[in-house]
Amino acid sequence: MHHFQYRDQVLFAEDVPLEKIGQEVGTPCYVYSYATLTHHFKVFDGAFAEVPHLTCYSVKACSNIAIVRLFARMGGGTDIVSGGELFRALKAGVPANKIVFSGVGKTEKEIAMALEAGILMFNVESEQELLTIAEVAKQKGKTAPISLRVNPDVDPKTHPYISTGLKKNKFGIDIQLAKSLYLKAKEIPYVRVVGIDCHIGSQLTTLSPFLDALERIKQLYKELEKEGLGPQYLDLGGGLGIPYHGEEPPHPKEYAQAIIKAAKDLNCTLIFEPGRVIVGNAGILLTKVLYLKQNREKNFVIVDAAMNDLARPSLYGAYHEILPVKNEDKEMLVADIVGPICESGDFLAKDRKIKQVNKGDLLAVMSAGAYGFSMSSNYNSRPRAAEVLVKGSEYFIIRERERYEDLIRLEKIPAWLE
Ligand code: LLP
């Protein structure tokens, strides 16, 4: 359920017509719906109400500090994967003791920063990383709370670029080796084992990979318990998918019920790291038609948003529905919807059947809230789009459109070229 709906054939974000935002803020811009964001967080978090749990929103999905703060205000924590995300989470007001730190390549500096902040736990992805965390903790005179991110070798049946829980992936610690590393960790000073973690991939549309992974993790958990190492936290990562184009992923309640049932004999607090399922359908990318053109083979609709704004179609061949902001009765057209970037891979949609559009029309690229703005870049020296948060009949610019000066802000001309 989301709050981007037509009223009298005009597309609204909650109670604000998108045309108004297009005119006043300009395009391209990301528009998020407060009601959708909060509803999704409540549904997900509420689905686990009957068990001790913590919902750690995955900052990478949509990293704007206003959005991160919103979930923090609702009692959420965050899942972070870099010093930059830690900085954002703290700026957004997320209590440090609700932050989990994942990622295969944490630097010493990032580890030190997280120790100083006092995060809930490090999800450790290799033995060398474990030793480095212990070393940094020793220097700081602190004890680092850790869990091992276990790679359960389960096929999440999603796009290969976003599957992470197979043994051929770079993520996590091979489940066969995890027990011995846990036993080692138990003996290492300055680290304290508090959890067990796994995240097998993103945009999962069935429950079975989650449950298969959980079964494997449970076995390990039980073995660890026998060794006097019953971790307090079980972090099951993120990954629940959303409908982009007819997919029918399990509802969060269904996901929660299955997990609660499978995990009920474990004596621990569950942690989740949802990203897409919370923000994916809560945001759109608003863009304007610049030109129409045809060649002998194809129709092209050239819009002012490009792969630098939304990389998912180019990178994963991802499908995003594209809707006219004014939904008039018109002929249908089959076209590639492309951006201004100088790459053939710069498209938002290929061979897409849409209603005939004209120069100047606004289009909404739907389900762009997750991995949209957060993956955007300045390629072709395009200033990054503005981000807007709609709440009822009001809207707020939560990130200004970048200016040309922002593009060169950190660049320097050496003296010998002056
Ligand atoms: N936890 C960890 C350790 C992760 O690596 C991720 C996502 C999440 C949680 C959140 O997963 P979610 O609930 O959003 O599925 N750029 C890709 C998705 C990359 C996902 C990376 N990791 C896309 O646009 O589809």
Image (tube, grey):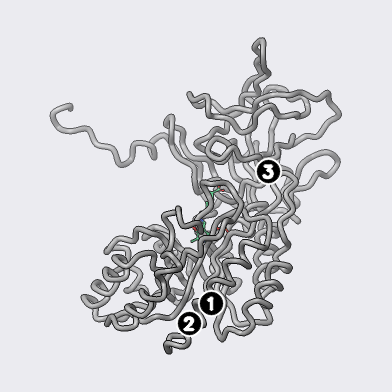
Disc 1 marks which amino acid?
A: Gln
Mark 2, other Cα within 10 Å: few <14 / some 14–19 / many ≥20: some
- Relative image position of residue 358 (x, y in whole percent): 72, 22
Residue at the (41%, 76%) spot, across then down: 179
Residue carrying label 3: 366
Please, what secondary structure does the residue beneath circle 1 have? helix
Disc 2 marks which amino acid?
A: Glu
Does residue 375 sit above or below 356 in this rendering?
Answer: below
Q: Nearer the viewer, residue 71 or 149?
A: 149
Residue 219 marker:
1
- Relative image position of residue 187 (x, y in whole percent): 30, 83
| Distance of label 2 from label 1 (alpha carbons) | 6 Å
Residue at the (58%, 71%) spot, across then down: 214
Mark 1, other Cα within 10 Å: few <14 / some 14–19 / many ≥20: few
Q: Earlier in the sequence, mark 1 or mark 3?
A: 1
- Relative image position of residue 44 (x, y in whole percent): 67, 68
Residue carrying label 2: 223
Q: Nearer the viewer, residue 181 or 378?
A: 181
Please, what secondary structure does the residue beneath circle 3 have? loop
In this rendering, would 140 be left or right of 314?
Answer: left
- Relative image position of residue 219 (x, y in whole percent): 53, 77
Q: Which of the 4 image quadrants contains residue 143?
A: bottom left
Q: Is residue 72 visible?
A: no
Q: Is residue 53 visible?
A: yes
Q: Which of the 4 image quadrants contains residue 130?
A: bottom left
Q: Are marks 2 and 1 in contact (CB under 8 Å)?
A: yes
In this rendering, would 30 be left or right of 351?
Answer: left
| Distance of label 3 from label 2 (alpha carbons) | 45 Å
In this rendering, would 159 be left or right of 14?
Answer: left
